[in-house]
Amino acid sequence: MISFKILKKSKKSRARLGLLETPHGVVETPALVTVATQAVVKTLTSEEAAQAKSRIIISNTFHLHLKPGEKIVKANGGLHKFMNWQKPIMTDSGGFQVFSLGFGRDLKVGKVLKYFPGNERKEIIEKSNQPKSVTITDDGVHFRSPLDGSKLFLGPKESMKIQQDLGADIIFTFDECTPPLSTYEYVKESLRKTHNWAKICRKEVKSKQALFGIVQGSRFKDLREEASQFINSLGFPGYGIGGDLGEDKKAMDQILKWTMPYLDEQKPRHLLGIGYLEDMENIIKNGIDTFDCIVPTHYARRGIAFTSIGKLDLRKSKFLKDKNYLDKTCGCFVCQTYTRSYICHLLKANEITPLKLLTFHNLYFFNTFVEKIREKIKRGAL
C-alpha cells in the first residue's frame, strides 16, 4: 500500500507539500508523473528517465493489454522488473481509451475542448448516443483492437485483473472519461456507470496495490460535487480527477474548485492527463499533488524544446546557424553539450538521436520546473 504525509500547507492557496510513500520509494509532491505508455518513456532507457529527474511514471493498461499482454509482464516479474524501473509506477484503468477511441476520435476533441463545431459550443452527444467504434454498456466497453480489428471487452473486473497482473504501486478504477459536447443527461448517465464500476473495482482488488477512485462529472457543478462526495465515501487511499475538463483552462480551474473541497485532504489527489507548463502552478494551487502529461515527450519527438525563453522549434532552418546551447539556464547534459545548430542538423537529417536529446531535456526541464514550484510553497510564495 501507500502512505501520504502532508509536510506543509500554503496559507495563500490549497497548495501543499507532501511525501507519497510507496513500496518502491518516496515521491516528493507536488510531482509530475512521467508517461511511459508501453512500459517505456519513448526514446529513453529507464536509467535515462531517472537521470532526467523522473521519480514516478504511469503506464497504459489498455495498450499493455494489447501488447505484450499482462500475462507476459507478470511472467517477467511485473512492470518494475520488466522495464528495470525500481521507482514507483501508476497504471491507468483503460477508461481514457473509452473516450480517445470513441467520441474523442469521432469529434477530434481532447479533454479540454479546443474545437467548436460551427465555431460555437453545441451539445451534440445525447444520453442515448454511442461512439462509432466503441459500445458502452452497464457491464463495460466493447472495442475493436486498433492492432488487428479483433473484438475486445474491458470492464471494471477486467481492468482490475490486468492492473493487478501488471503490478504497479498505484492503480485506478475503471471509468468513462466523458467527451466534451455532452449533454447533462449523457454525463449523468455516464456517472451512474462510473460509480457502479468504482464499487465493483473496490471488491475486485485482492492485492496490496493502492486503488485510486476517479472523480468524473464533466463541466457540471452538481455532478462534480456529487461525484466527489460519492468517490470520497468509498474510502479509497487516493483520488484521480478525470476529464473532460471543460472548454478552456478557466473552466478547468472552476472544475477543480468544485471538486477539491469534498475529497479527504489527507489523501493524495492525481489529475489525469494535464500538465502544460502554464497549467502547473494553477493546478497545484488547487490542491493537486501529482499529475501526468505527454507534453514533454510528445513535443520532443516533433522537434520542440521547452526552454526558459519559450518553445523552440528546432526543425526551423534558422537554428542551423545558431551556435548556442539549447538553454543556458538548464543543467541537463544536453544543454551542457549540444548546440541548437547540431540538433537542428540531426532533425533535418531524419536521425533518431535528436529525439532522445530533446526528450531528455524536456523531461529534465519540466521536472525542474516542478521542483521550483515546491520551493515556492516551502518559502510561502505560492
Image (cartoon, rainbow, N blue to C red):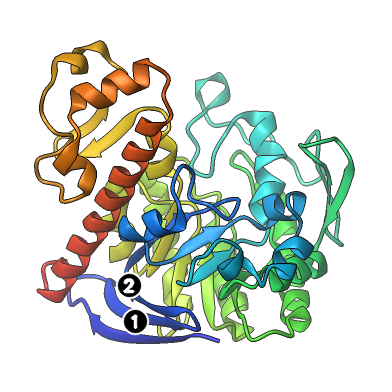
Marker disc for residue 29: 2
Instruction: Determine whether 161 is above or below 276 in the image.
Output: below
Question: Residue at horizontal 51%, vertical 26%?
Answer: 120
Q: Secondary structure at mark 2?
A: strand
Question: Residue at horizontal 67%, vertical 45%?
Answer: 99
Amino acid type of the residue that numbered disc 1 sits on in the rendered structure:
Leu
Q: Position of residue 230 (x, y in %)?
A: 62, 77
Which quadrant is home to the N terminus? bottom right
Q: Is residue 375 visible?
A: yes
Q: Label 1, on which residue?
A: 19
Instruction: Determine whether 199 is above or below 335 in the image.
Output: below
Most foreground residue, 248 or 347: 347
Most foreground residue, 167 or 188: 167
Q: Position of residue 136 (x, y in %)?
A: 82, 50
Q: Is residue 135 left or right of residue 340?
A: right
Q: Is residue 129 left or right of residue 86?
A: right
Q: Position of residue 58 (x, y in %)?
A: 52, 60
Question: Residue at horizontal 43%, vertical 71%?
Answer: 260
